Image: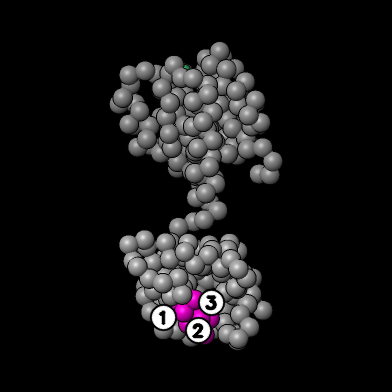
Amino acid sequence: MAGKPSILIVEDEADIRELVRYHLDQEGYAVNEADSGEKALERAAATRPALIILDLMLPGTDGLEVCRRLRTDDTLREVPVIMLTAKGTEVDRILGLELGADDYITKPFSPRELVARVRAVLRRASGASAAPSQETFSRGRLQVNFDTYEAAVDGKAVTLSLREFELLKFFVQHPHRVYDRLQLLDLVWGQDVHVEPRTVDVHVRRLRKVIERDDSTPELLLTVRGVGYKFNPDALEP
Ligand code: CA
């Protein structure tokens, strides 16, 4: 799905469909339309949209049923849905969220607000797929299990203190980015702990002894001179 994210608008009222299409076009999205629930499901299967804007009140298969079917379809269950609901239909709104809509917007709505919601939902969805909340990290020589606090290097379990483990966890979850000592203290130690920035260096040195092939020439936990440290997972593979 390179290029513009595609969005499917499902709405039987042509005026609203046109309005929404116009504003999403302006934002550079690729827009598809459907004017009934049946067509929505066909279109969704054919075009695999990045997001669906789904009106609740549709003739025939209504929005709730469309949402329910999307959520039970293996290829479409992950597609975010923003529901359009009529004013005052609280029950429908709750039902929509229970059936797996990601957000809802009440008619009449401002197109600008809709566009903002679309952006927010897409951002959330891409964040979720770029950084899945995984319980393990496994690459090349290094395995880290965030649930059990166990780590292994070259297939052998290694012993780490709690803080060393947390520092390692932080680095493997934030590869390639440089963090200075104060940031690492904030993010790994927490702001309420009063420790010297040098503590970070000490922990990095200990971690290197455990995970580097040769800790005198680190390849994984790199020093960025004058700035801080960064994790280079590429060196985990031969
Ligand atoms: Ca409608």
Q: What stretch is highlighted in magenta?
A: 201-210
Separation of marks 1 and 2 at Cα, in angstroms: 8 Å
> Label for residue 142?
3
For the residues bearing labels 3 and 1, Cβ distance under 8 angstroms: no
Question: Which residue in the protein does label 1 denote?
Answer: 160
> Label for residue 133?
none
Taking depth in this image into account, of 110 and 71 the one nearest to the observer is 110
Q: Place residue 141 in its image quadrant.
A: bottom right
Picture coordinates of residue 37, whole percent (x, y): 50, 26
Query: Which is more N-terminal, label 1 or label 3?
Result: 3
Say which amino acid is labelled 1. Leu
Looking at this rendering, what residue extends furthest in the left direction?
A: 91
Q: Place residue 2 in its image quadrant.
A: top right
Is 97 magenta? The answer is no
Residue displayed at 54% across by 35% down: 119
Taking depth in this image into account, of 160 and 202 the one nearest to the observer is 202
Question: Which residue in the protein does label 2 denote?
Answer: 210
For the residues bearing labels 1 and 2, Cβ distance under 8 angstroms: yes
Residue 155 makes an appearance in the image: no
Quadrant of the rendering where the N terminus is positioned: top right
Looking at the image, residue 124 sits to the left or right of residue 43; the answer is left
Residue displayed at 35% across by 68% down: 194
